[in-house]
Image (cartoon, rainbow, N blue to C red):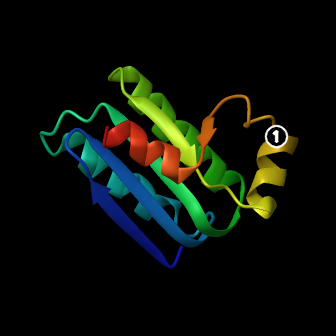
């Protein structure tokens, strides 16, 4: 993962991932998410923007699943946004397209900025 950018909204957050998400860098993403979960803000919506995600391996998928479970534990919504064709194929093969709410980032922004 080349870069993680965090976009804060009133009670929501968008995590924008650029590059690769794999065994070598999932800890960085999970640590960023942990900071968000413990910073005192009560987020009700989390979005993971995958528009610039080049590739993802099983560790990256595991990290997304873990983040979704943590969001569910605090009754927050969790979205995956703008997955590209390469990442979409992996989601389809692993049936994670049925587990995650996958939406365009424009729709996510409409949800968090009504």
26 or 90: which is nearer to us?
A: 90
Q: Residue at x 31, y 43 (%)?
A: 113
**Image location (x, y in percent) of residue 72:** 43, 24
Classify residue 32 as left or right of residue 83. left
**Based on the displayed image, in which of its 4 quarters is residue 8 positioned?**
bottom left
Q: Residue at x 74, y 58 (%)?
A: 87
Classify residue 64 as left or right of residue 77. right
Q: Residue at x 51, y 44 (%)?
A: 107
Instruction: Name the residue furthest bottom.
Output: 2
Viewport quadrant of the N terminus: bottom right
Viewport quadrant of the C terminus: top left
Where 49 falls versus 77 (above or below)?
below
35 or 111: which is nearer to us?
A: 111
Q: How many marks?
A: 1
SS for callout 1: loop
15 or 9: which is nearer to us?
A: 9
Classify residue 43 as left or right of residue 15. left
Q: Which residue is mark 1?
A: 94
**Image location (x, y in percent) of residue 27:** 46, 59
Tell me the crowding category of disc 1: few under 14, some 14 to 19, or many 20 or more residues within 10 angstroms, Cα based: few
**Image location (x, y in percent) of residue 28:** 42, 64
Instruction: Name the residue furthest left.
Output: 40
Where 113 falls versus 100 (above or below)?
below
**Image location (x, y in percent) of residue 73:** 38, 22
């Amino acid at each position: 993962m080349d870069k993680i950018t965090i976009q804060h909204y009133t009670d929501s957050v968008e995590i924008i991932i650029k590059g690769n998400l794999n065994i070598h860098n999932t800890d960085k993403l999970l640590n960023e998410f942990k900071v968000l979960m413990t910073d005192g803000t009560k987020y009700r919506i989390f979005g993971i923007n995958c528009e610039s995600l080049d590739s993802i391996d099983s560790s990256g998928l595991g990290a997304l699943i873990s983040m979704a479970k943590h969001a569910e534990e605090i009754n927050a919504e969790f979205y995956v946004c703008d997955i590209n064709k390469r990442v979409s194929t992996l989601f389809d093969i692993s049936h994670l397209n049925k587990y995650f709410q996958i939406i365009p980032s424009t729709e996510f922004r409409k949800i968090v900025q009504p």
